[in-house]
Structures are given as C-alpha cells and as structure tokens.
Image: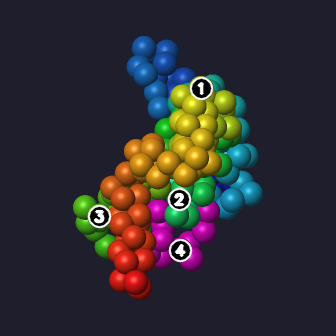
Amino acid sequence: QAQIAELKILGSLAKRAREKGVQVMIEGPGHVPLDQVGKNIALEKKYCAKAPFYVLGPLVTDVGAGYDHITSAIGGAIAASCGADFLCYVTPGEHLRHPTASDVRAGVIACRIAAHAGDLVKRRKKAICWDRDISIARKNRDWQKQIMLSVDPDRAIEISLSQQIAFFLRL
C-alpha cells in the first residue's frame, strides 16, 4: 500500500513538473519481491503517465548479503523486460560496507548483464546481434572471439588463463 501511495504522489508531482516544462524521471524502490517486479513497473507507468522509471536494482530478496549485485541483477532483468527505463547497479557489499572499486566493477557488470537480458526481451536489434555473434563463436569454439564479445573480457581472459594454467600444471 505504501509503495502504491508513493507512486500516486510521484505521479502527481510528475504532472506538476511537466506542466512547468520540467523533465521528469521517477525513482523506484530498491527492494521488491520477485513476483511483484512487473506489477510495480506497470503501476509506475500508469500512475506517472509513463515517465521514465529508474529502479534501484531492485533486490528481490534480502538474504544475499555479499551477493546483492546478483539479487539486484535478477530483479533488474525482470524490471528491464517489463519496461523499466534505467537500472541502477548494486554492489556486492551494498548493505555491508562502503563500496570498493572491485565492488563497483562487479555491480556494474551484473547490471549490464541484467540490462542486456531485458533488451533481448524487448527485441533490441543490437542486443540480439551481440548474443547471436557470441553464440556462433561459442558453437565454433572460437575462444578469442567469445572473450572479445563478452560483457567483461578481462574476467573472461582471467577464467580462460586459470583453466589453461591448471591444465599445464597437471601434465
């Protein structure tokens, strides 16, 4: 009830801002149960006259302390597929500490993956081509192209090299 009341107030404020010629973006909640993410997006679009919706994740569960970037990416992928316009990244240490540079990197990468998954649902041509190209590289076992096309080539190289090193150490 509180979230719906907030959306109605935000919708009223958005209308007033637009009447004054001010651009509007609505910030959404950061914690939404998985089964309510789509409904939350639909209600924002309804009450806020389709104003761009910026969601903080959303985190779909609170049990992921240390993995909030993952719980956020799950919610973000659903939110993006349901019409959220902008996803905010969440770091692994979100509710535990101030973020480190590696926390920010992990959060941004998880968010980019979530946004890409949403773009696939929306049938965005660039996202579809990117997925198709990496799938073809995977089918062809073209490791270099897979790495190049991955969302985080540095991490892909790290994983690939650690596998190769482990293989040679066993010889």
Q: Amino acid at mark 3?
A: Ser
Residue 101 horizontal side relative to residue 48, left or right: left
Label 3 crowd bin: few (<14), some (14–19), many (20+), radius 10 Å: few
The mark nearer the N terminus, 3 or 1, is: 3
* Residue 117 visible to an observer of this rendering: no
Residue 69 horizontal side relative to residue 9, left or right: left
Q: What residue is shown with label 3?
A: 102
Q: Amino acid at mark 1?
A: Lys
The mark nearer the N terminus, 4 or 2, is: 4
SS class, disc 4: loop
Which numbered marker is on residue 125?
A: 1
Q: Amino acid at mark 4?
A: Gly
SS class, disc 1: helix
Q: Amino acid at mark 2?
A: Ser
Which numbered marker is on residue 7?
A: none
Q: Nearer the viewer, mark 3 or mark 2?
A: 3
Q: Quadrant of residue 91?
A: bottom left
Q: What residue is shown with label 2?
A: 72
Stretch in magenta = 60-69
Q: What residue is shown with label 4?
A: 64
Kindly report the distance in space between the C-alpha atoms of the residues bearing marks 3 and 2. 17 Å
